[in-house]
Image (spheres, rainbow, N blue to C red):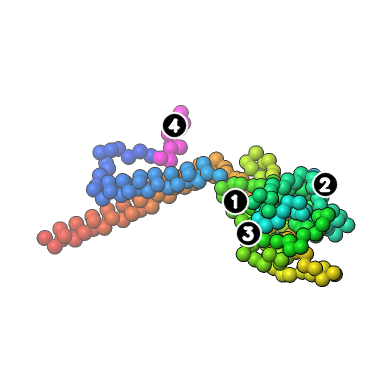
Amino acid sequence: MVFDVRRLDIYRKVPKDLTQPTYTGAVISICCCMFMLFLFLSELTGFIATEIVNELYVDDPDKDSGGKIEVNLNITLPNLSCDVVGLDIQDEMGRHEVGHIENSMKSPLNNGQGCTFEGQFSINKVPGNFHISTHSATAQPDNPDMTHVINKLTFGEMIEVKNVQGAFNAVGGASKLASNPLASHDYVLKIVPTVYEDLKEKQRYSYQYTVAQKEYVAYSHTGRIIPAIWFRYDLSPITVKYVERKQPLYRFITTICAIIGGTFTVAGIIDSCIFTASEAWKKIQLGKIH
């Protein structure tokens, strides 16, 4: 006797003339198809889109940097001549530079009365500070005016990604034009290492930071007021990592199968309940007639 493989069919077919179409079933079928189409398009959008996942860990992510952080600073001092503007750098490793000029540029403003300072320099990964002052000037001005606008202050590579809302230029746009001209300004920065990893697993290293600030009048040992704009920084041991991810194909297929199967099952149960109830009601009505 030849084995009939059709016995293994768990999807037995019912002859069409043994089925009964109903208006209720048609409405439920249309709603079912529209609902499945909506869920399918929603899942497809999620499958195509790139998801940004963030995580925290304790480590130095950029071990190839040689213990350095690149800094980009752009600041405008509308009432201080470029001749007396300088950048000084200090840290706990003993570094002390007065009048740092490498990779820096000064642009005169207001017929030489003001100055825009732009500099790119590196700092060590230890607590320290860098400040804009007149300390490197040959002759100190009588009334140095430290009112300013910070156009940009970033650390490391600038990350500009749509779904990453980080504080990479937290102090950018800060204006102290209405401040006391002789006041010193302290910006206390807490720098947080940040890593961005794209779908190709290429990593970019940057730093976010928080900022607190204060304003005060400082006197030298001779009694003179020598204001400065201080950026005091410290590094956080916590690293923030952003990772681009896309939904795996197998998960998308599994979700679509669940949507189709679940929707058909629930719709079938609803249709069956409505049909059974309507048939029972008809029998009751026929009983009343007789």
Query: Label 3 to label 1, Cα distance in Å?
Result: 22 Å
Q: Which mark is residue 164?
A: 1
Q: Residues within 10 Å of mark 3 (few under 14, many from 20)?
A: few
Q: Which mark is residue 4?
A: 4
Query: Label 3 to label 4, Cα distance in Å?
Result: 82 Å
Q: Residues within 10 Å of mark 1 (few under 14, many from 20)?
A: few
Q: Earlier in the sequence, mark 3 or mark 4?
A: 4
Q: Residues within 10 Å of mark 2 (few under 14, many from 20)?
A: few
Towards the viewer: 131 or 70: 131
Q: Are marks 3 and 4 in contact (CB under 8 Å)?
A: no
Query: Label 1 to label 4, Cα distance in Å?
Result: 61 Å
Which image quadrant: the C terminus?
Answer: bottom left
Which region of the structure is painted magenta? 1-11
Query: Label 2 to label 3, Cα distance in Å?
Result: 31 Å
Q: Are marks 2 and 1 in contact (CB under 8 Å)?
A: no
Q: Which residue is mark 3?
A: 174
Disc 1 secondary structure class: loop
Disc 4 secondary structure class: loop
- The nearer-to-camera label among 3 and 4 is 3
Query: What secondary structure do most residues of the magenta stretch adopt?
Result: loop
Q: Which residue is mark 2?
A: 66
Q: Are marks 4 and 2 in contact (CB under 8 Å)?
A: no
Q: Are marks 2 and 3 in contact (CB under 8 Å)?
A: no
Residue 63 point in image, percent of width and height: 79, 47
Task: Name the residue type under label 2.
Answer: Gly
Q: Earlier in the sequence, mark 2 or mark 3?
A: 2
Q: Residue at x 35, y 45 (%)?
A: 33
